[in-house]
Every structure is written in structure tokens, then in C-alpha cells.
Amino acid sequence: MIRLMNPQSGYFGDYGGQFTSDTTLGDLAEVEEAFFHNRKDKTFLQQVDVLRREYSCRPTPLYFAKNLTDELGGAKIYLKREDLNYTGSYNLNNTIGQVVLAKRMGKKVIITETGSGQHGVATAAVSANLGLSCMIFMGEDDMKRHQLNVQKMNLLGAEVIPVSSGSKTLMDAINEIWRYRFASPTDTYHLYGTVIGPHPYPMIVREFQKIIGKETREQILDKEGHLPDSIIACIGGGSNALGIFDPFLEEENIRLIGVEAGGKGVDTNQHAATLTKGTVGVFHGARSYVVKDPYGHTQPVHSISTGLTYPGVGPELAFLKDNGNIECHYQDNQEALGAFHLLSRTEGILSALESAHAVAFCVREAPKLPRNHLMIVNLSGHGDKDLDVVLDYTRNHKKEPIRIF
């Protein structure tokens, strides 16, 4: 399978590219050149590897969820425990790689955007570790929902910049950072947190995140002696999904399943199921699927999980979806909450609400499958950041019992 159809312009089939102003093309070319120069440099790779092992505590475990498996009575379920990374999520894989790259480029300031704050915390932590300044743009509504992560970013030395425009969420934080970078000094590096944006960022983030799938492949072969039958991951922008899928894309008999946020229902305008309900368009510098209103404008989206509240998706995932390499499904707020509670009760694991969407699909599908079906769920983050959201939702929806399928 040929994924990167045009390495110079960064297209995955018809998706991707560089739909941005001329003022940023020089910055993008500089980042691309630095990445291709360093990606095979032994000193660079060694520094990234040491930070992954000794700072981030990789490899993360592949955990047999025996209690959940017994509860559901079907497929044998494993969890890839990215929630056990330092800072509590898979985001550190990418931030380590990009901050090391930025420092080797001579940059002094890291700027980035964040939704739930997990990517922001990871960026702030690595920036502090490597002695770089850090500015993080975050929607005001997201800041209210995730005050703990805002406090963490501040304690780690980052400046958190509230964004009050639009829906005051991740989409608008990205809009604001694009405005800022046009006037930012040359010692500033824009660190993308997921596989969106103009080339070369979707490729760079995927390369730093595919450590998830590489480890998973080795671990399941060690534990079971053969590859899994299905792998499930949530999809917002798509980096945790692409990170675990990438090393399995050439395997024809493995189902690679991406689960989007169904919100309050995909037949309403209160969802974030971009690959399921979106249409092709250009958004944030790349051609991909976008959720639009009836007039063709980008539409604000909704999910109980802040990290999935984004109306676009990575261009490589759009290409893989069209080619049939991955399946796309969705789970709504209630189903994600049900999975959150079920995993907590059966395994004693609090998952991020983003990850709970993937768990919800597992809960729905596993009972239909035989015990010899090996299913892996990418548990992309820890749920500490979401406890206030879960408790508030439970208090405000007492007449809507949580659905445990």
C-alpha cells in the first residue's frame, strides 16, 4: 500500500497538502528539512529513546483485562496502557520527539494548542525538561472543564493563554495559534499535538506515535504467539489511533477500528463524528474530512470528551478510511460514560473519556465474538482529568441512567 503519494507536498491520496499562506511555507519547509535530516541521526534517535525509557517510562504494558473479558463473555481483551505514560497519556510520545527536534533546530520557544490539557501538560513537561519556554493556547470553556491540567501546565512553567473566541474550545485554540504564529519570532516552534495540519506535521506526529503499535505488536506476539484479530482506538484528530494502527496496516486479517464521538447523536448537530458524518474540505491547512453546517461552513462539534471535540481529522486517516484499511464507528456520550464506569468497576482502571469511546465499542462488540478472538483497545489516557466532568454530568442527568449496554 502506498500511503504518502507525493512526499514533497505531503499528500495521502487526495488528502493532506499545504493549504496555508505563503508566510508560513518557509517555516514548514524548515521543519520538514530538520525532520528528514534528524530522523536517521543516531544522536537524535538516542536522545529520544532515552527520554522515552527514563522520563516517560516506556514501554507501556499490554494488559490482559481478565475481569472485563469475563464480564462480557466474548473476545479476549487486552488494553494497551498508554495511560501509564508519565503525564497520563500517549501525548508524551510526540512531544518528546518534537521538542527534541525543535531544540536541535535552535528554537527557544514552543507554542502549541490543547483541548483537554493532556497534550498541553506533556508539552509543558518536556519543554521544562529541555530548558525551552512554552506557550499553550487553550479555549476558555476547556480551561473551566480541566482546571487541574491548567494548574499542572502553570506549575511546569508554561504560559497558558485563554482563547475566548468562537466556541472557546480546541478548534478556536488552533485558530488563535495560527494567528499568533504569523507574527511570532524565528526562534519559535509550533508543536502540533495530533496528525492534522499542513505537511509535514501529519507525517511527523505519526512517526513519533507509532511506537505504540510497535510495542503492541511485540507484546502480543510474546503473550499470545500470534497477532490480534482486532484493534480499537478512539479518533479525534487521530494520532493515538494512527499510532497503534500504523505497524499493522499491512496485515489484511486484522480489523483496525476507529471510534469517533457520537455526542448527543449523529443525527443532531451535537456530535464529533467527522469520518462518519463529515464531508471533504480544507481545514487548518490540509484537505480532509470536516464537519460542516448546511451552508458548507465548519460547524462547532460536541462530545463529553474534550479531546475529541474537533471538527476535522488527520488526512492520512481520511485516506485509510476511503481505501477500506480502517473501519469507522461512533459511540455517544451515554455509551462512553457507561464504558467508563464498567471499566472502573471491573478492572479498577479510570480511563480518559476519549479512551472510553473505544472501550464502549469493545463492550458492544466483544460479546458477539468467540473467546479465541484477540481484541486490543488502545487506552490512550488516564481519567483523572475527567472526574469533574463525569460527576457534573451524573448530577445534571439524574433522570438519564448510565447505559452499560
Image (cartoon, rainbow, N blue to C red):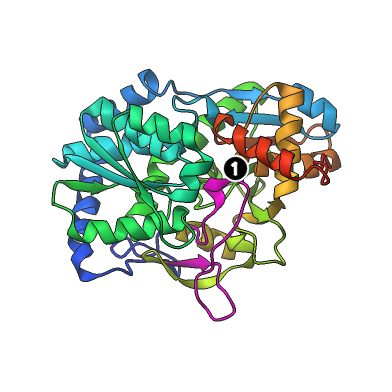
**Vertical arrangement, residue 387 with respect to residue 184, above or below:** above
Q: Nearer the viewer, residue 170 or 359?
A: 170
Q: Nearer the viewer, residue 283 or 150?
A: 150
Residue 101: quadrant of the picture: top left
Q: Is residue 290 magenta?
A: yes
Q: Label 1 is placed on what type of residue?
A: Glu
- x and y percent of residue 121 in the render? 40, 34
Residue found 22% across the figure and 64% down from its top = 25
- Residue 284 visible in this rendered orientation of the protein: yes
Q: Tell me which secondary structure the magenta stretch mostly adopts.
A: loop
Which residue is pictured at 69% across the width and 39% down the height?
A: 359
Q: How would you rate the neighbour count of disc 1 (Cα within 10 Å): few for under 14, some for 14-19, many for 20 or more? A: many
Q: Disc 1 designates what residue?
A: 354
**Quadrant placement of the C terminus:** top right
Q: Is residue 291 left or right of residue 210?
A: right
Q: Give, as a single range, the part of the protein colored magenta.
A: 287-313
Image height of 404 relative to 201, above or below: above
